[in-house]
Image (spheres, helix red, strand yellow):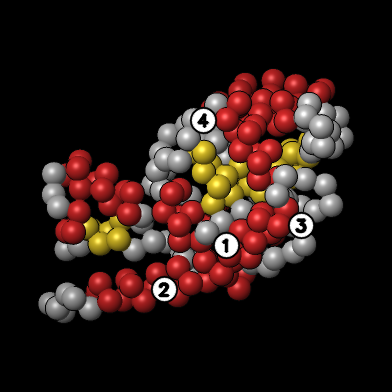
Amino acid sequence: DALVAVSGYYQQVMAERLDISPQSIAFIPMGLNPDDYSTSAAPALPTIGFLSRMGYEYGLDILAEAVVRLRRRAGFEKLKLRVTGGKTGNDEAFIRPIREALERQMPGDVLFQEGYDFASRQAFFRELSLVAVPVRKPQAYGMFALEACASGVPFMTPKIGVFPEIAEGTQAGILYNSNTPEDLEQALADSLSDFATLSQRGKKGRQGVEENYSINKTVDKMAELFAQFKTI
């Protein structure tokens, strides 16, 4: 038998829950195929993307307030926001007032994209300067962050859960400490004001996925794990 965790963060979490040594749990990150993703030039106007379930726990409301606040600053009046992701019927009551407020306060500069299939996500990434998902709870894994990196787009999240290790493994993550609209606004302002650094993060993100989060590396590590067991 073997236990496998998809992140170093969750390896520690499960070791504590099961009261076992972390070394008894294999750490094998889930990967993706970088060849399925393409990079593109950054948009002419700064554009933030939200890609996740559009529910309370993923902080769409925090991002919405941060973006509205940031647009009041000089130089960010034309800041754009693109939103896509899964949702359930229970999420509609949460999403509706956020969407209505955004469309009222930044008409023409906010878009809720309905398509969430792979082709739609690829097109979504081509429009972005960065992806920001202010999750409220630590996550065991962050596929949206890896998809963004594979597309050459930096990501921004609170400094919790798996995201510090993905940021380290890709050099494309921008982390902030306090998950409030005010702190997110400042983090966005700092990052979007430095186009050269943001562009470099995007390039490093693509390289980081190829080197550390490729599906081929996941397969190789799983094969190594299986090879430790004798055939019965």
Q: Which residue is painted at 43% across and 49% down in the image?
A: 164
Residue 100, x across and y down, in percent: 76, 23
Residue 79, x across and y down, in percent: 79, 38
Q: Which mark is residue 42?
A: 3
Q: Which residue is painted at 82% across and 22% down in the image?
A: 104
Distance from label 4 to label 1 (Cα)? 23 Å
Which is in the foreground here, disc 2 or disc 4? 4
Q: Secondary structure at mark 2?
A: helix
Can you identify the residue that label 2 sits on?
Answer: 217
Can you identify the residue that label 1 sits on?
Answer: 205
Can you identify the residue that label 4 sits on?
Answer: 179
Residue type indicated by callout 3: Ala
Q: Which residue is painted at 17% across and 58% down in the image?
A: 24
Distance from label 3 to label 1 (Cα)? 14 Å
Distance from label 2 to label 1 (Cα)? 16 Å
Q: Relative to the observer, which residue lies in front, 168 or 29?
A: 168
Residue type indicated by callout 1: Gly
Residue type indicated by callout 4: Asn
Does the image show residue 84? no
Does the image show residue 71? yes
N-terminal label among 2 and 4: 4
